[in-house]
């Protein structure tokens, strides 16, 4: 029983880490898109 619990906990932790990684990637992507959209704000030519 204890072994089963440990196994489940490990699986849960792996899932959680995967979710975190995906979330970080999504945030990075959104930040990048936002930068692209606001590029003209940082354009020194203006």
Image (spheres, helix red, strand yellow):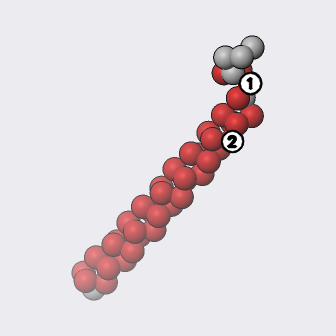
Badge 1 crowding class, 10 Å Cα cut-off, few under 14, some 14 to 19, many 20 or more, is: few
- Give me the disc on residue 33: 2
Front-most of residues 32 and 42: 42
The quadrant in which the C terminus is found is: top right
Q: Residue furthest top?
A: 46
Could you say where residue 11 lies in the image, as x and y percent from the top left? 39, 74
User: Circles 2 and 1: CB distance less than 8 Å?
Assistant: no
Mark 1 lies on a secondary structure that is helix
Comparing labels 2 and 1, the label whose residue is closer to the camera = 1
Based on the displayed image, in which of its 4 quarters is residue 10 positioned? bottom left
Height in image: 19 above or below 2? above
Front-most of residues 44 and 17: 44
C-alpha separation, residue under disc 2 versus residue under disc 1: 13 Å
Based on the displayed image, in which of its 4 quarters is residue 36 positioned? top right
From the image, tell me which residue sits under label 1.
40
Height in image: 7 above or below 38? below
Front-most of residues 20 and 1: 20
The quadrant in which the N terminus is found is: bottom left
Badge 2 crowding class, 10 Å Cα cut-off, few under 14, some 14 to 19, many 20 or more, is: few
Mark 2 lies on a secondary structure that is helix
What's the residue at 63%, 41% (across, down)? 32
Height in image: 40 above or below 20? above
What's the residue at 48%, 57% (across, down)? 21
Q: Earlier in the sequence, mark 2 or mark 1?
A: 2
Q: Which residue lies furthest to the left in this view?
A: 2
Height in image: 11 above or below 29? below
Q: On the rendered structure, is 46 left or right of 21?
A: right
What's the residue at 42%, 61% (across, down)? 17
Based on the displayed image, in which of its 4 quarters is residue 12 positioned? bottom left
What's the residue at 56%, 45% (across, down)? 28
Could you say where residue 16 lies in the image, as x and y percent from the top left? 45, 62
């Amino acid at each position: 029983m204890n072994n089963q619990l440990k196994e489940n906990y490990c699986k849960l932790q792996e899932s959680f880490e995967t979710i975190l990684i995906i979330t970080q990637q999504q945030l990075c992507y959104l930040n990048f898109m936002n930068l692209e959209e606001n590029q003209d704000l940082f354009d020194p030519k203006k």
